[in-house]
Amino acid sequence: MSHTWITRAETGADIPAIRDIDLAAFETPLEADLVEALRADSSWIDGLSVVTTDRDGRPVGHALLTRCHIGDAPALCLGPVAVLPEHQGTGVGSAAVRAALEAADGMGEAHVVVLGHPTYYPRFGFAPASRYGIRVTIDVPDEALMALTLRADRPLPGGTIRYAAPFGI
């Protein structure tokens, strides 16, 4: 059965539902705690946290982008993406990631860095996001990230990636 998911920017009323999604989707509460820490950090950008809802408007998944830097150039970092277990594999995560990337593109952002090992990417719906083009100009051990270039006229800069403080990197 095919689903058409509704995506929208997160609101304050969604925070308890997002916490429940995170606790259900992740193996430990540490990843759920990371989402809350990113929301409280100065790297938070309003409009770049997206929820996917079911037909009744109940949040069932979410994705968020926060500020980071590649060298001195501003970029975004895709934070943890989570989907309620009963909706995993139905496109909820992909819809949230796509909507977040479209919002970032609409705000004029050019680059998005994705944390995590490539084996996690399909789990969190990153395969469709990779259509934006995977570009890496930095030496990364164990292929621990991918970087998306949203604007072809702005090549991915080189340099050290500085993440939001809650990532602990």
Image: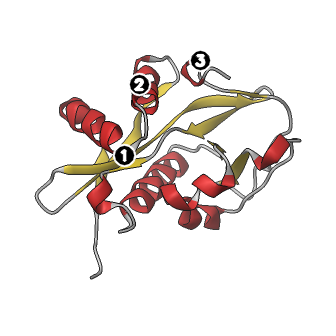
Displayed quadrant of residue 95: bottom left
Earlier sequence position, callout 1 versus callout 3: 1
Point out residue 66 in the picture as x, y percentages from the top left corner.
Answer: 53, 32
Q: Looking at the picture, tell me which residue is in the foreground, 21 or 65.
A: 21
Residue in front for this viewpoint, 50 or 103: 50
How many marks are shown on the rendered structure? 3
The residue that disc 2 covers is 33
- Using the numbered discs, state the Cα–Cα distance from disc 2 to disc 1 in whole angstroms: 13 Å
Near-viewer residue (60 or 55): 60
Q: Residues within 10 Å of mark 1 (few under 14, many from 20)?
A: many
Which residue is rendered at x = 59% and y = 56% of the image? Answer: 121
- Disc 2 residue crowd, few under 14, some 14–19, many 20+, Cα 10 Å: some
Q: Say which quadrant the C terminus sits in.
A: top right
Question: Where, quadrant-wise, is the N terminus in this rendering?
Answer: bottom left
What's the amino acid at mark 2?
Answer: Asp
Residue that mark 1 sits on: 25
Q: Which mark is residue 133?
A: none
Comes first in the chain, label 2 or label 1: 1
Measured in 3D between alpha carbons, the distance from the residue under mark 1 to the one under mark 3, in whole angstroms, is 23 Å
Return the mark for residue 165: 3
Asked whether, in this view, residue 146 is left or right of residue 65, the answer is right
Amino acid type assigned to the residue bearing label 1 in the image: Ala
Place residue 75 in its image quadrant. top right
